[in-house]
Image (spheres, rainbow, N blue to C red):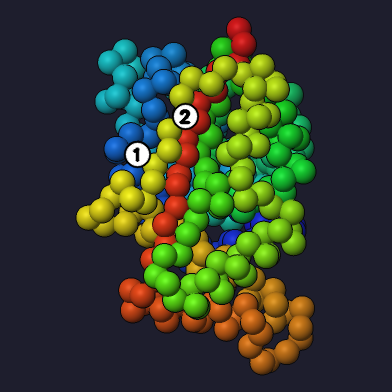
Amino acid sequence: MANLENPAYILPCDATEAERLNQQHNLLFRVLGQRLLPSSIPLEKVHSVADVGTGTGIWLQSLASQAPQLSPNYDQRYYHGFDIGDAQFPSDSRSEDLELKFTTQDVLKPFPRVFRSRFDLVHVRLFSFALQEVNLKIAMENLLRILKPGGYLYWEDTNWTSVKETSGLAEGSAIKEAIFRNMRSRGLSSHIIDIVHRLGLENGLRCLSKADYHSDDYPDVNVLGALASPAIEAFLRKLSLNERLTNNSEEPGELETLFKLHQELNAKGLLRWKETFTTVVYQTPF
């Protein structure tokens, strides 16, 4: 999800971040068993897809390219990516491709009427750094308005309470504490999946599947640690820039010091981040 006049969003919005988002997608594709959709979503019933907080659009583009091979009775589908800003949209996003579109849209504002009850599937990924906890209810309501009756909401995210730094280094603990302190100060939720689940049930959704993917499930290579570490570095990079602007000083502050420390320790392979990544599928009433 792009950062545009959003005080809660604490990740950058530049070429480096776009590259991280694409690498993140590739890692998650591996974690999820090289599947873009869980088996609880029948692709043959999905003809229109919205990807909200689409970022670079890589998930949506991947689904559009793979759907013909995944569905034996493929017919033309309609794919639409939404984000609050278009800085990270793919370079060809303004083409005349009728099947794949990208539009700027703030999830905290109602979607235009043309999108009401328009989509069979709405996909959301990693809003934990994008939305304040008090705004999750508004976001959920806006997402449900663009789903058809019987449509599917596919939410992927991380409860940051599951994120651990297990090297035993004091510096790792300091970095983790800085992250949680800044999340709290911005009103971000460290247990977003729990809140989304509660909101889903309150809105009459049926939970079709819920799956947790743990770092310890990959003993040969910590794939989820490789997912968490760049996100944490991006987090600290953005916060350190904000800190320098706020303090109006050339001297590095606490967050800039932690950012450089994370870079150094991570480059040496000394940090050991672990987390749990969760996917949930809901279906709206018919």
Q: Nearer the viewer, residue 236 or 212?
A: 212
The answer to whether one can see residue 62 in this image is yes
Residue type beneath disc 2 = Lys
User: Where is residue 96 drawn, in percent x and y?
Assistant: 50, 36
User: Where is residue 204 drawn, in percent x and y?
Assistant: 66, 16
- The residue indicated by pointer 2 is 210
Q: Quadrant of residue 235?
A: bottom right
Q: Nearer the viewer, residue 135 or 145?
A: 135
User: Where is residue 10 drawn, in percent x and y?
Assistant: 64, 61
In the image, taking residue 7 as reference, residue 130 lies left or right, namely left
User: Where is residue 47 drawn, in percent x and y?
Assistant: 47, 18
Work out whether 247 lies above or below 283. below
The answer to whether one can see residue 91 in this image is no
Residue appearing at x 33%, y 34% in the figure: 35
Extreme top residue here? 286
Work out whether 50 lies above or below 169. above
Tag shown at residue 32: 1
Work out whether 225 lies above or below 152. below
Q: Quadrant of residue 43?
A: top left
Mark 2 vs mark 1, foreground winner is 2
* Tag 1 secondary structure: loop
Residue appearing at x 68%, y 29% in the figure: 199
Q: Quadrant of residue 142?
A: top right
Q: Nearer the viewer, residue 190 or 284?
A: 190
Tell me which numbered mark, 2 or 1, is placed earlier along the sequence.
Answer: 1
